[in-house]
Amino acid sequence: MLNKKASLEISIQAIVIVVLAMTLLGLGLGFIRNMFKNISSTTEDVTEQVRQRILDDLITGDKKVAFPKSEIVIDKGGSTILTVGVRNKKDTSLNYKMKFNPISGPDGAPFSIDNPSWFQSGQPLNGYTLGAAESDVRNVRLSIPISVQSGSYVLTFDVLNLDFPVTEPEYTYAQKDFFIVVRG
């Protein structure tokens, strides 16, 4: 009779432990889900603050283009979002395209990358249009392939004025130099 009572107590204890464990697991999962919701809203707030800061920089700095950093450090196979701003300082509308041009690679020698392979944006084929004295902020994803050599790359971010032929000096509306440091 004593053994049956002991085994019954062990079974009840096991059931209580399982119920407590499931309850704590449910509470933990609920807590983590709420934390991810908070992180999402915080990320949206930070993105909006960056966007506003770039617009402010364009206006107060009296610039044609605002680029977030002069040096971007990124791992092979990594990606990041760049937020860039363009301001039309003309009295007429500006039809423009964004382009990234390679200048030199890790050993200082010229290198060639395909503009769309590292940089991804929702840029339409016929470009964007900005009204007179307007500003705009765009997001561009920078993705570095694993096969890329580690080191420092020099590029330019160009805003091209599509209202002028390529041979005209006004074709390049604005330009900003920057570095991409690829870590291996």
Image (cartoon, grey):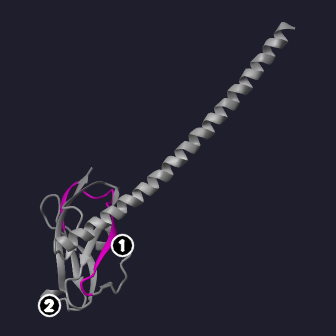
Q: Amino acid at mark 2?
A: Glu
Tally the marks: 2
Q: Which mark is residue 121?
A: 1
Relative to 13, 175 lies left or right: left
| Outermost residue toward the right in this view | 1
Q: Are marks 2 and 1 in contact (CB under 8 Å)?
A: no
Q: Which mark is residue 168?
A: 2
* Residue 14 higher or lower than 33, as above or below: above
The question of residue 158 being in magenta is answered with no
Q: Quadrant of residue 61?
A: bottom left
Residue occupying the point 41% across, 60% down: 44
Magenta residues?
A: 132-155
* Residue 34 higher or lower than 109, as above or below: above
Residue 85: x and y, percent?
26, 72
Inspect this view and state whether residue 64 appears: yes
Q: Quadrant of residue 119?
A: bottom left
Residue 109: x and y, percent?
13, 64
